Image (cartoon, helix red, strand yellow):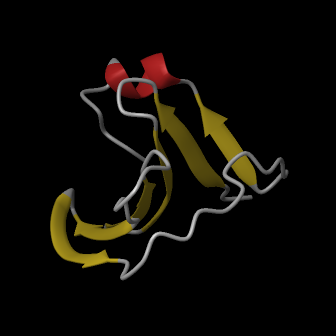
Amino acid sequence: MNRLKRWLNSGTNTTYLGFNKGAYSYVLLIPEEKQGAVALLDIKKNGEVISSKRCNSNSFGEKGIQSRSIEDIVDDTVRNNEFKFP
């Protein structure tokens, strides 16, 4: 099963959700809950951002939902891999 990856960046309190499909990767950035913060969606091809979309409003939901379809990634794992995610 190809699971959605979830990473909480301890430096910024941003939650990242992402997955790869072939040469493409899709990453949703959910920032720390504060006034004016909005989520972003980045689409990459071969590691280069080809599209970036910004949400229009700040609607925060539950970021810590537990599911067999979500794989939590340890912060140090991403940091020690030059911040490559997913």
- Left or right relative to 65: residue 55: left
Residue projecting furthest to the front: 35
Say which residue appears at 36% left-offset and 24% top-offset: 11
Whole-percent x, y for residue 58 in the image = 46, 69
Residue furthest out toward the bottom: 56
Q: Quadrant of residue 6?
A: top right
Q: Along the line of sight, which residue is nearer the eye, 65 or 76?
A: 65
Marker count (numbered)? 0
Residue at 17 percent of width and 66 percent of height: 49
Q: Indicate the position of residue 62 as horizontal and vertical percent values.
A: 72, 56
Q: Report which quarter residue 55 is drawn in.
A: bottom left
Looking at the image, residue 85 lies above or below residue 27: above
Quarter holding residue 36: bottom left
Q: Is residue 19 above or below residue 70?
A: below
Q: Is residue 63 above or below residue 41?
A: above
User: Residue 43: x and y, percent?
Assistant: 30, 71
Residue 28 percent coordinates (x, y):
44, 63
Q: Is residue 30 left or right of residue 56?
A: right
User: Which part of the image, by quadrant, shows the N terminus?
Assistant: bottom right
**Residue under the image location 77 percent in, 57 percent down:** 69
Residue located at (31% from left, 39% from top): 84
Q: Is residue 42 left or right of residue 78?
A: left
Task: Tell me: residue 62, above or below residue 55.
Answer: above
Front residue of this view, candidates 60 and 11: 60
